[in-house]
């Protein structure tokens, strides 16, 4: 569902992404680990069609994003680090609005069912999202993806700033989407969450994919050590 072929993005003499090759199939959760400036967000933005590649291809459901941007967006849902919802609207009103943009005219019962499936507490459905925590807003984002029937989910640091409970709940939601066949690509700094939810993990540095793992084939300790080594960080021993 997600494919990049030698995907490259340069800004003048700076290379933000250097010949990236990766694949994410149906039901897979691929976590991209790396420091700021590693190329994770650039990858997400290229797949969304927000920016054009210098060379190479980004494909969603075998469609080239550069050539079929409008069509590929039909398959996509995107949750950034800080999800932008309309603060003066309630959760259900936001969901109704964004579903309408995606061409989905849904009954109130259907909207409620998606909010329930996303794990939002029922007493929050009619409340303005201006009063929501980040975790609650992320659940509305998942409900939007469910209502849109998205086949591909792109996430950029979605658990940053979440408390452990909210982060765990978000991971559970990702696994539910995986069971529905959704292909997920998540950029994150969170090694623990990546190991917990991912089917595949990649480590990026300086715009390059340095290493890849099947998540079940590597322990959290080995992942941490490999990450620190790749980043040239020295492990602190207390």
Image (cartoon, rainbow, N blue to C red):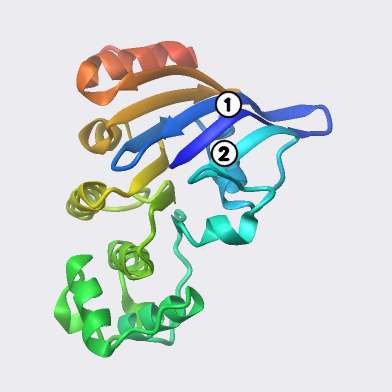
**Residue at left offset 48%, top offset 46%:** 61
As measured in the structure, the alpha-carbon distance from the residue carrying label 1 to the one carrying label 2 is 8 Å
Give residue 118's position: percent from left, percent from top: 23, 65
Quick one: label 1, few (<14), some, or many (20+) residues within 10 Å? Answer: many
Q: Residue furthest front?
A: 62
**Residue at left offset 54%, top offset 25%:** 21
Q: Is residue 235 left or right of residue 119?
A: right
Q: Can residue 77 be seen in the rendering of this structure? A: yes
Q: To which quarter of the image does residue 207 belong? A: top right
Q: To which quarter of the image does residue 146 belong? A: bottom left
Q: Split into 4 quadrants, where in the image is the C terminus?
A: top left
Disc 1 vs disc 2: Cβ atoms closer than 8 Å?
A: yes
Q: Nearer the viewer, residue 171 or 129?
A: 171
Q: Is residue 149 left or right of residue 179?
A: right
Give residue 212's position: percent from left, percent from top: 40, 19
**Residue at left offset 16%, top offset 74%:** 121
Q: Can residue 119 be seen in the rendering of this structure? A: no
Q: To which quarter of the image does residue 132 belong? A: bottom left
Give residue 3's position: percent from left, percent from top: 51, 35
Residue marked by disc 2? 43
Residue marked by disc 1? 20
Lower sequence index among marks 1 and 2: 1
**Residue at left offset 22%, top offset 55%:** 166
Up/down of 185 relative to 109, above or below: above
Up/down of 106 relative to 202, above or below: below
């Amino acid at each position: 569902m997600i494919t990049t072929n030698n995907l490259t993005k340069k800004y003048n003499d700076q290379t933000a992404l250097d010949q990236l090759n990766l694949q994410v199939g149906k039901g897979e959760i691929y976590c991209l680990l790396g420091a700021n400036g590693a190329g994770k967000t650039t990858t997400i933005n290229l797949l969304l069609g927000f920016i054009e590649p210098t060379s190479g291809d980004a494909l969603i459901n075998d469609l080239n994003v550069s050539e079929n941007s409008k069509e590929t967006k039909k398959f996509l849902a995107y949750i950034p680090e800080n999800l932008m919802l309309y603060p003066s609207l309630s959760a259900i009103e936001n969901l109704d609005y964004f579903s309408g943009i995606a061409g989905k005219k849904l009954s109130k019962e259907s909207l409620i069912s998606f909010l329930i499936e996303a794990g939002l507490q029922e007493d929050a459905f009619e409340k303005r999202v201006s009063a929501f925590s980040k975790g609650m807003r992320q659940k509305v984002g998942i409900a939007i993806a469910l209502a849109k029937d998205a086949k591909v989910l792109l996430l950029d640091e979605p658990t940053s700033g979440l408390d452990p409970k909210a982060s765990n709940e978000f991971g559970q939601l990702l696994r539910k989407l995986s069971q529905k066949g959704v292909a997920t690509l998540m950029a994150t700094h969170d090694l623990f969450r990546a190991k917990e939810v991912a089917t595949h993990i990649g480590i990026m540095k300086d715009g390059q994919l340095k290493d890849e793992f099947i998540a079940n084939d590597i322990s959290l300790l080995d992942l941490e050590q490999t990450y620190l080594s790749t980043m040239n960080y020295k492990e602190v021993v207390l």
